[in-house]
Image (cartoon, rainbow, N blue to C red):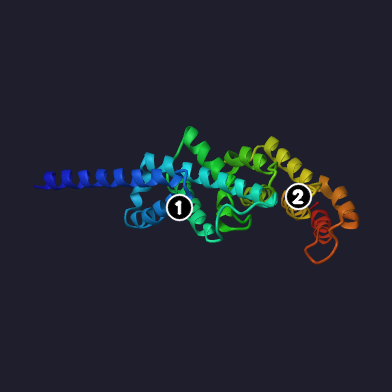
Amino acid sequence: MTTSLAVVAFAALMALQGSAAELAARLSGPDLVTRVQAANRFEPLLKDQPEVLGDRAVQDSLIAALETENALIVKNWNAVTTGQKPLFEEGYGEHYSRILGWANRIRAESDLTGGRRVRLLRALVLASYNGDSPFAKDLASEGEDIVPYVLEVVRSPIGPNRWNGLDLIGLLFARADARTLKRPLTANTRELLRSNAREGLQDPAPDVRRHAVQAVVQANDTAAIPLLRYMAEKDVDAKGKWSVRALAAEGVTRLQQSR
């Protein structure tokens, strides 16, 4: 009797995982409406049966779903900045947050390896989020493993993406100082990250320069002091407590104190 019940339970689980995998596959479909509908159905299923996140087919589909939504955000940015109509409504953010959250749960709860882990980490770093969010702070704990994608995103043509890359540089150094990185940064990586943050100080966008100032300070990059001094006097973004000039002046003080 016990054996029969175990067989029935196993068969039911396999059927559920098959259903979850089929539903998850629709999350990366070509039509946004279909993707949102699939997410609406997948959400309660995942809540009731969280173990489906361990299914490889579901994991692959969620990674693909995040890649799909990341690509849509890039297309929307390009459309809006060239005067075209937005590609989605304001409520899209809720859908995107669900996809990002599910993909991040795979990172946190599953032991992915090889190419699948590479795809997931890259999709997460290139995602849309706030650089001071709990998500970003936790993502930075991956350490050396995310550095290639951080370096990719700081060179993005999209300003908010560059913010995120610079914020992650700062978070990587903060995590390194706290010794909470899963994979510590090498000496070469540290210098490479500092160099990229320093380059951000010369970004044409003032908002990106603000994030770069914070990154070089968190990286304790005393080599950036001369440029920060110049920015504190000459940067065109000069008004307000959070202007580039104000942040640069504060950065000089903090880096001098750290010597």
SS category of the residue bearing label 1: helix
Instruction: Pick out the residue farthest to the left.
Output: 1
* Mark 1 Cα-neighbour bin, 10 Å: few <14, some 14–19, many ≥20: few
165 relative to 94, above or below? above
Residue 218: x, y in percent? 72, 52
Residue nearest the observer in this picture, 181 or 48: 48
- Which is in the foreground here, disc 1 or disc 2? 1
Q: How many marks?
A: 2
Q: Is there any visible trace of residue 34 in the rendered image? A: yes
The disc labelled 1 sits on which kind of residue?
Val
Measuring from the top left, give residue 37's x and y in whole percent. Answer: 41, 54
| Residue at figure coordinates x 81%, y 60% from the top left | 250
Mark 1 in CB contact with mark 2 (< 8 angstroms): no
Disc 2 crowd rating (10 Å Cα; few below 14, some 14-19, many 20+) is: many
Q: Residue furthest top?
A: 114
Residue under label 2: 216
Q: Which residue is mark 1?
A: 33
In the image: residue 252, left or right of residue 135:
right
Q: Residue furthest front?
A: 84
Q: Of the residues under marks 1 and 2, which one precedes in the sequence?
A: 1
| Camera sees residue 184 | no
Residue found 75% across the figure and 53% down from its top: 217
- In depth, the one of 25 and 229 nearer the eye is 25
Q: Which three-letter amino acid code belongs to the residue tagged 2?
A: Val
In this rendering, would 154 be left or right of 97? Answer: right
Label 1 to label 2, Cα distance in Å?
Answer: 42 Å
The residue that appears at 61% across and 46% down in the rendered structure is 75
Please provide percent x and percent y for residue 237: 84, 58
What secondary structure is marked by label 2? helix
